[in-house]
Amino acid sequence: MDILLCNAGLFPSGFQLTEEGIESTVGVCHFGHFLLTQLLMDKLLAAGKPRVVMVSSESHRMPKQLDFDKFPLQQSQFSALTAYGQAKLANVLFANELQRRFGERGLTACSLHPGTLITTDIGRGSKVMSLLMKLISPLTKTPHQGAATSVYCAAYGSEDNIAGQYFSHCKQARSSREANDLEVADKLWQLSEKRCNAVN
C-alpha cells in the first residue's frame, strides 16, 4: 500500500455520538482516520516510501487552540462549527505527528485544504448549511478542481517538498500556529491511541 488518502468527513446538523460514544464529527473526521492508519501501518511501511494525505480544511484555524477539556465535545458544550474546526485541526496535527514519528522509516505525511466543495454535499444534515452552500455555489470549485490538491499531494514526486507540509490550491500554505505545536500533536496522538485501543 503506497498511498493512504484520508478524506472522510461530515458537518454535523446537531450533537450525535458514534457507536463508540464519541462526538460524531471528530469520530468520523479524526478518530476514524487515526484508527484506520494504525491498522494499515505495517502495510504502509512495507511499501518503502508510503504517503499519508489528510484532507483537512481552512476551518482548522477555528478554534485557535485545541482545548483537551472539550475534546471531543460533550452535548452541553456542542457547537457544530467548533466540532468541525476541532476535527480539521486534528487532521493537520495528526499528519504532522505521523511525519515526526515515521518520517525516518520512509513515510511521508501531509495535510491540505481542498477548497469549498458543494459537490461533497457536506452540509446535507443541516438545512441552514445546505441553503448557505446553495447560495455560494457559483463561487465554489468543481469536482475536478476540488480533487486537484489531494491528487497533487498524493502524486507529487519529491517527498522532501511534501513532508509535514500543509497545502491549498496545489501549493504549500501556512497552517495555524496550533497545528504546528509539537506538544499538542503528541498529546492528541496519545489521547487518540488510548481511545482507539479502547474500542478496537
Image: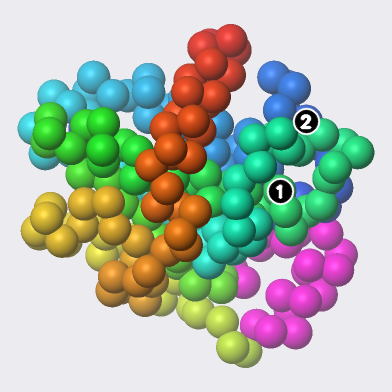
Q: Which residue is mark 2?
A: 17
**Which residue is at a point 62% across and 72% down the rendered structure image?**
118
Q: Are marks 2 and 1 in contact (CB under 8 Å)?
A: no
For the residues labelled 2 and 1, the Cα–Cα distance comes to: 12 Å
Residue in the picture at 81% in, 75% down: 131
Above or below residue 72? Residue 40 is above
Residue 108, image x, y percentages: 20, 44
Q: Secondary structure at mark 1?
A: helix
Please provide the residue range marked out in magenta.
118-137
Q: Closest to the observer: 8 or 73? A: 73
Q: What is the secondary structure assignment of the residue under circle 2?
A: loop
Q: Which residue is mark 1?
A: 83
How many neighbours does mark 1 have within 10 angstroms: few (below 14), some (14-19), or many (20 or more)? many
Tell me if I can see residue 73 in this picture.
Answer: yes
| Residue 197 x/y as whole percent | 52, 12
Give the residue drawn at x 26%, y 38%.
100
